[in-house]
């Protein structure tokens, strides 16, 4: 059976795994963004806090994903919980770091003017600082999404959802019929989905960033 | 409508270090521009920022229109005080109209009223609303950004305006224009304006009164520009006023304010050299002013070489400042020729007249 025959034969199954894969990654990126931006807001004013938050999230990223999932299984069991926990943890670093950089990079004159004309703290944060840091935060989410697409495949090890199932199944059956096709289908699927999501991020960026912040 | 601002024994201390502002008291009269001028780091900006409580004073009392500012909500207080800073501090993600409309929006005006006000404000600062309303700050020149900054500060019609080196970051020509514009606005609006700068010339030009500040915001002198120029309170102020104090003073006086002298001999371009020499010898003068047939000054002629005409390179009008007149005196040597509206000869300003004016300014101040 050729690769294309394999794909058309398994199309509905691959499609549902793709959807599960994307949905897991997108949901985890959103969760990571909520946590990451909150952490970023909490620490960006203090250089010490920023350093600690960046170091901690970097430390998480250095743990091999396979090992992290293995360590989470005894605590959270199999299936979705360890997958979600791992993906959110990995997604934090780019988002936290970009939030801190984005917020810290807001021109002091702009926030001073905002305070000076009578905006309260919350107004300055939501109407000025977060809007100006938004392109950086979005870039962090974009990096996180790309990274999580790959890491989500490993989640199949913890019986997580997604295209990783195909890859693992193919690899464990190496040598038998269609084993290679299965692994390749999973891998190619992830690459294609990653490219599509990246495109979507470009569009989101275009429609949610003020024209005043974009280049000429 | 303007309000008097009063600072009484205001002190700002950061930790154990010597106070940044020490026991500062001043009264800023309603409807006037008071300029805080001093070297960088003297605490002038800190002092200004305590008025709208961007910095909280450690001790002392600040009142605006008789109201104790420490009793008010700081955000509410700031919405009633215009605030313009260096580089404008415009919000880059908002259009010009949104920037100008921020404070009225915060005050809860309805959309229609805000939009009308934005148009009015842009007009006021000399920007065509149709052209500029929907632009973003990055699409404006430095001078235009400053104008928008001033429009934003004035949008909610605050009785008080704080300006922190608002024209510090633009080129000298634009800066001059913006200063003229501010004076025109002030003649119309009569706000109480506190203006911070380190540029003494700017202070002289804009201030109804100047407060020259030293370290820890100590007031070295608080007086009219004329008085500060004529009688610097001490050596520090004198040093700050600079070597050109008398010259700067001359910008406060105009040619029409002084008594013009007349040339001893005026001759016409059609006169013969021999006749010119004779009239000069009879009058006992060495120079004659040569006028053309329409009585416009052309040249000076010396008694020994009546054929040689020394052209006049620099002339002044009645509206010129005495500084311009002095410039002309130095350029042509001797006298500045004053001309009328149609370029006709009116009289002369000599160096003694200029000197007398300087003395008089000094005595009056």
Image: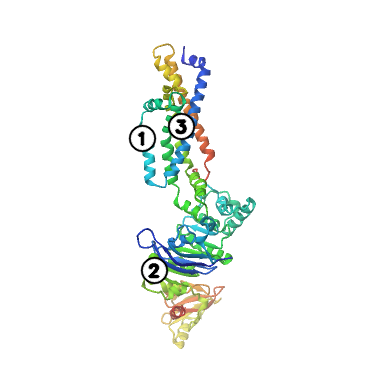
Callouts 3 and 1 on one subunit: yes
Residue A59: mark in rendering: 1
Chain letter for mark 1:
A
For label 2, the crowd category at 10 Å Cα-Cα, with few meaning under 14, some 14 to 19 and many 20 or more, is: some
Q: Nearer the viewer, mark 1 or mark 2?
A: 1
The image's colour scheme reads: rainbow
| Along the viewing direction, whichever of B287 and A48 lies nearer the viewer | A48
Residue identified by numbered label 3: A145
Figure quadrant of the N terminus of chain B: bottom right
Which subunit holds the residue at mark 2?
A: B
Is disc 3 in contact with disc 1, using a CB cutoff of under 8 Å? no
Provide the residue designation for mark 2. B240
Q: Position of residue B138 (x, y in %)?
A: 50, 49
Kindly check if marks 1 and 2 are in contact, taking CB atoms under 8 A apart as contact: no
Residue positioned most to the bottom: B282
Horizontal side of residue A38 vs B99, given as left or right:
left
């Amino acid at each position: 059976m050729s690769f294309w025959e394999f794909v058309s034969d398994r199309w509905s199954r691959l499609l549902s795994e793709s959807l599960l894969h994307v949905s897991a990654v997108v949901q985890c990126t959103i969760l990571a963004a909520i946590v990451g931006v909150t952490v970023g807001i909490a620490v960006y004013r203090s250089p010490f806090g920023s350093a600690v938050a960046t170091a901690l999230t970097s430390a998480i990223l250095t743990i091999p994903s396979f090992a992290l999932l293995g360590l989470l299984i005894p605590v959270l069991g199999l299936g979705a919980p360890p997958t979600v926990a791992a993906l959110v943890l990995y997604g934090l670093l780019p988002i936290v770091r970009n939030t801190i950089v984005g917020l810290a990079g807001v021109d002091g004159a702009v926030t001073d003017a905002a305070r000076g004309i009578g905006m309260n703290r919350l107004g300055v944060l939501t109407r000025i600082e977060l809007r100006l840091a938004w392109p950086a935060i979005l870039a962090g989410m974009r990096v996180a999404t790309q990274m999580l697409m790959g890491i989500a495949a490993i989640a199949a090890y913890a019986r997580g959802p997604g295209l990783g199932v195909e890859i693992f199944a193919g690899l464990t059956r190496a040598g038998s019929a269609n084993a290679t096709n299965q692994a390749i289908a999973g891998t190619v699927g992830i690459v294609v989905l990653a490219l599509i999501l990246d495109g979507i991020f470009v569009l989101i960026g275009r429609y949610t960033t003020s024209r005043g912040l974009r280049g000429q | 409508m303007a309000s008097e601002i009063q600072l009484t024994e205001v002190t700002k201390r950061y930790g154990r270090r010597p106070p940044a502002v020490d026991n500062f008291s001043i009264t800023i009269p309603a409807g006037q521009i008071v300029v805080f001028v001093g070297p960088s780091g003297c605490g002038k900006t800190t002092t200004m920022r305590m008025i709208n409580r961007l910095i909280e004073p450690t001790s002392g009392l600040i009142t605006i229109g008789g109201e104790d500012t420490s009793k008010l909500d700081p955000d509410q207080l700031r919405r009633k005080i215009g605030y313009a800073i260096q580089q404008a501090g415009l919000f880059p993600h908002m259009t010009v109209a949104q920037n100008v409309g921020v404070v009225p929006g915060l005050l809860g005006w309805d959309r229609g009223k805000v939009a009308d006000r934005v148009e009015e404000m842009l007009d006021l600062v000399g920007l065509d609303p149709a052209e500029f309303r929907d632009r973003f700050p990055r699409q404006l020149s430095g001078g235009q950004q400053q104008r928008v900054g001033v429009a934003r500060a004035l949008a909610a019609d605050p009785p008080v305006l704080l300006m922190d080196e608002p024209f510090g970051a633009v080129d000298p020509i634009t800066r001059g224009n913006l200063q003229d514009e501010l004076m025109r606005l002030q003649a119309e609006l009569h706000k109480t304006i506190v203006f911070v700068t380190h540029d003494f010339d700017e202070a002289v030009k804009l201030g109804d009164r100047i407060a020259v500040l030293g370290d820890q915001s100590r007031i070295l002198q608080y007086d009219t520009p004329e008085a500060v120029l004529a009688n610097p309170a001490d050596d520090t102020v004198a040093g700050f006023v600079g070597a050109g104090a008398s010259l700067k003073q001359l910008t406060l006086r105009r040619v029409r304010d002084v008594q013009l002298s007349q040339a001893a001999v005026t001759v016409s371009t059609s006169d013969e050299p021999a006749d010119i020499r004779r009239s000069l010898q009879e009058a006992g003068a060495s120079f004659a002013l040569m006028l053309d047939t329409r009585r416009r000054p052309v040249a000076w002629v010396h008694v020994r070489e009546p054929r040689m005409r020394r052209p006049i390179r620099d002339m002044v009008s009645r509206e010129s400042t005495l500084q311009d007149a002095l410039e002309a005196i130095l350029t042509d040597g001797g006298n500045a020729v004053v001309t009328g509206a149609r370029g006709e000869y009116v009289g002369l300003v000599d160096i003694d007249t200029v000197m007398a004016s300087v003395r008089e300014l000094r005595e009056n101040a």
